[in-house]
Structures are given as C-alpha cells and as structure tokens.
Amino acid sequence: IWGKKKITKEEGKDIVEKFIGKDKIDTIKQTGETDTKAEHTIPVYSYEVSLKNQDAPTISIDVTQEGGMVLWMLNYTEKEGSGKEITLEEARKKAEQFLKDKKYPNMKPSYYEKVDGTVVINFAPEENGVIMYPDLIKIKVSMDDGEIIGFESLGYIMMHHDRDLPEIKLTQEEARQRIKDDFKIQKVNKAVIPLESKREVFCYEFKGEYENNPFIVYINVESGKEEKILQILQSKNAVLTQ
C-alpha cells in the first residue's frame, strides 16, 4: 500500500459505490479522515452510507488514502430475525463469491466463528499451493439471509506482497518425523505463518489430533524446526476448516 498513489475524497466515494453497489445506495457522506502524520495508523477517508429505503446511515466504511483500498466496512442495521438460519457452508459460499467479485482471488477460509446470528470467516490467499496466513481478510455474514455485513482487510493491506519463498529442503515425510508418532494427522498444507517476532516462516502445516484434542503443528520447510504448535479450543460456535 505504501508508495501507492494518493486518492482524493471523491475517488474514495467512487470506491465506496463500487464496493457496496451503486444501485443499493441512497447517499454517501464523508465523515472524517485520519491525520496522515499519526504514527502506526493507516490514513483513511471515512464514509457513512445510507441505503435506499432507509432513513438513517447504516454502513460505515473506511478507504485507504494511499491505493484506495477498503480497509473496513460494517453494516450495523438491526435485523428482524426470520428464525431461519443459513448453513455455514452457504455463508462460506456467499463470502467467497463476495471476495471474488471484489477481485481478491484464491482466498481460502481457515476459521469460522459464530456470534449472535452472524458468522465471521477468516480468509487467506493461496498462491501456488501455499496459504499466506499473514494476508488475512475477515468477512462477517448474516446467518439470517447471507448478506455480507462486515469486511476487514488490515492483514491483507499491510502484508500482501510477492514473496520470494525459500527453497523446501525437507520432504513432507521428513517433516512428519519431527512430530510425535501418536499425533494423528488429518491434513497437511504448505503455509507461510507470522511469528510473534513479526518474522514470517514457510512451513508444513500438520492438522490433526493428539490424545483426542485437535492441534496444528508447523514445521519449517528449510530447517525442520518446530515453529509453532496451536491447540484448537473447540466450541460449537467456532469451526476450524480442514
């Protein structure tokens, strides 16, 4: 994003129109902008959008001043629940289609969390068979009707770039040998993951079970080092994809 062309407020408005759909919008009002000298913030233009057939604005949206990317969108309309709920599978399809329409290709869902009639799905791009976990986009879907009511792309905006990945020096089998034998593996992916130190590492991602608890183990494809172990706390409201 840095070093990209700075857009005007009017161009920001056009981006909002495209993102939400011109035919749905009654009015767009610019409500603020970030001080570009503030540290550790992404300078944005903020807008409030009123949809047709609604009295008051119901959508807040931020567009980056450099590059004109939508950073954040939330539709805070209070919905009358119809009592029916779409499935997680249907919600995922709606979110995937939305991302495709907005020109975010090859996004793979990794985690779902249900909260009060909505589901938030984390997506990361997959490039040449490697999942790029730092480049995260979160999509919030209404379980009532499948409408996309939230979008947040901070990880994607900050981290997405062409990566020069290191050469893989271990086979999947060799990496597997670094993990306890009684870890039951269900799925293996290749992935770039962020570490606490903000460094990124290229790993094999082993998803599976140890003593009946779900875990993910990340083994560095170059050194064979175990970079991270995650125990997945399961609840009926949170689902990790395979």
Image: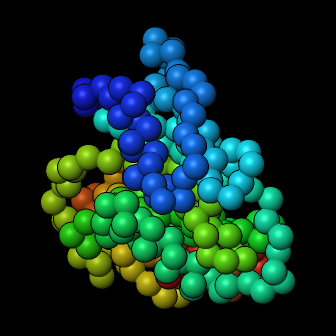
Q: Is residue 116 visible?
A: yes
- Does 163 sit above or below residue 186? above
Q: Residue at x 60, y 28 (%)?
A: 31
User: Please, which residue is most extreme toward the top here?
Assistant: 37
Q: Is residue 131 visible?
A: no
In which quadrant of the rendered view does residue 146 lie?
Answer: bottom right
Q: Residue at x 65, y 86 (%)?
A: 87
Q: Quadrant of the N terminus?
A: top left
What colour scheme has been applied to the protein in the rendered image? rainbow
In this view, the residue in front, 225 or 29, is 29
Image coordinates of residue 126 in percent, x first then y, are 32, 67
In this view, the residue in front, 32 or 38, is 32
Using residue 63 as the reference point, say whether residue 202 is left or right of it: left
- Does 68 sit above or below residue 119? above
In this view, the residue in front, 64 or 125, is 64
Image coordinates of residue 165 in percent, x first then y, are 20, 55
Q: Residue at x 68, y 58 (%)?
A: 53
Image coordinates of residue 28 in percent, x first then y, are 55, 40
Q: How many marks?
A: 0
Using residue 67 as the reference point, say whether residue 12 is left or right of it: right
Using residue 236 as the reference point, say whether residue 36 is left or right of it: left
Image coordinates of residue 17 in percent, x first then y, are 44, 49
Q: Residue at x 34, y 52 (%)?
A: 201
In this view, the residue in front, 190 or 94, is 94
In which quadrant of the rendered view does residue 103 lie?
Answer: bottom left
